[in-house]
Image: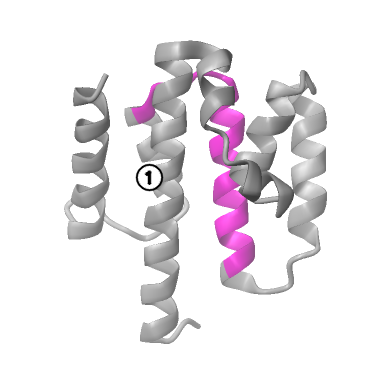
């Protein structure tokens, strides 16, 4: 069971991951893989951040099922529950960005891995962020 501090840390990390995923998904929808390759964070790739590393593999023409295996192997090495949950969320984001899922749908999908309700301030913050991204294109 998570303490209040652990829960807050989890939610803050979750929101950062989702914002990053929504931005990358929007780039992929609007500009395709070429646009996406320009915004993948190379430092995060080097640290094997699940989201950026997975999309880097896509940019390197690795097939989706191989990307999933690689990311799953990395996740299996993580023994910390909250951290592992966040990595699974990132992997799901990668899989759905590859499939070019609409960012609004991606938000609902990633949120389904948490107990954050859609009427919460956390969820509304993510919805507002998505609106900001869409206005910038």
Q: Residues within 10 Å of mark 1 (few under 14, many from 20)?
A: some
Using the image, determine if residue 31 lies above or below residue 57. above
Relative to residue 27, is residue 64 drawn left or right?
right
Give the residue displayed 32% in from the left and 29% down from the top.
104
Relative to residue 29, is residue 98 drawn left or right?
right
Give the residue displayed 17% in from the left and 58% down from the top.
121
Dot 1: element = helix
Q: Position of residue 55 (x, y in %)?
A: 64, 32
Residue tagged by mark 1? 19
Q: Residue 14 falls in which quadrant of the image?
A: bottom left
Give the residue displayed 39% in from the left and 34% down from the top.
23
Q: Position of residue 56 (x, y in %)?
A: 68, 32
Observer-nearest of 87 and 32:
32
Relative to residue 42, is residue 127 drawn left or right?
left
Using the image, determine if residue 83 lies above or below residue 137. below
Count of labels shown?
1
Observer-nearest of 1 and 90:
90
Q: Residue 77 falls in which quadrant of the image?
A: bottom right
Q: Quadrant of the C terminus?
A: top left
Q: Is residue 121 magenta?
A: no
Q: Position of residue 100 (x, y in %)?
A: 50, 18
Q: Position of residue 9 (x, y in %)?
A: 42, 73
In the rendered structure, which segment of residues is drawn in magenta? 83-103
Q: Main secondary structure of the magenta part?
A: helix
Using the image, determine if residue 61 lies above or below residue 92. above
Give the residue displayed 40% in from the left and 13% down from the top.
30
Colour scheme shown: one colour
Q: Is residue 121 visible?
A: yes
Q: Is residue 112 visible?
A: no
Q: Is residue 99 magenta?
A: yes
């Amino acid at each position: 069971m998570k303490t209040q501090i652990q829960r807050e840390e989890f939610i803050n990390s979750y929101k950062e991951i989702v914002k990053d995923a929504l931005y990358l998904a929007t780039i992929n929808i609007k500009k395709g893989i070429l646009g996406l390759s320009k915004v993948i964070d190379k430092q995060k790739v080097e640290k094997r951040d699940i989201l950026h590393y997975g999309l880097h593999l896509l940019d390197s023409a690795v097939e989706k099922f191989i990307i999933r295996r690689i990311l799953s192997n990395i996740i299996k090495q993580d023994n910390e529950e909250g951290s592992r949950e966040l990595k699974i969320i990132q992997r799901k984001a990668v899989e759905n960005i590859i499939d070019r899922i609409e960012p609004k749908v991606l938000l609902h999908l990633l949120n389904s891995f948490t107990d954050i309700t859609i009427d919460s301030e956390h969820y509304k913050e993510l919805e507002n962020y998505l609106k900001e991204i869409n206005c910038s294109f």
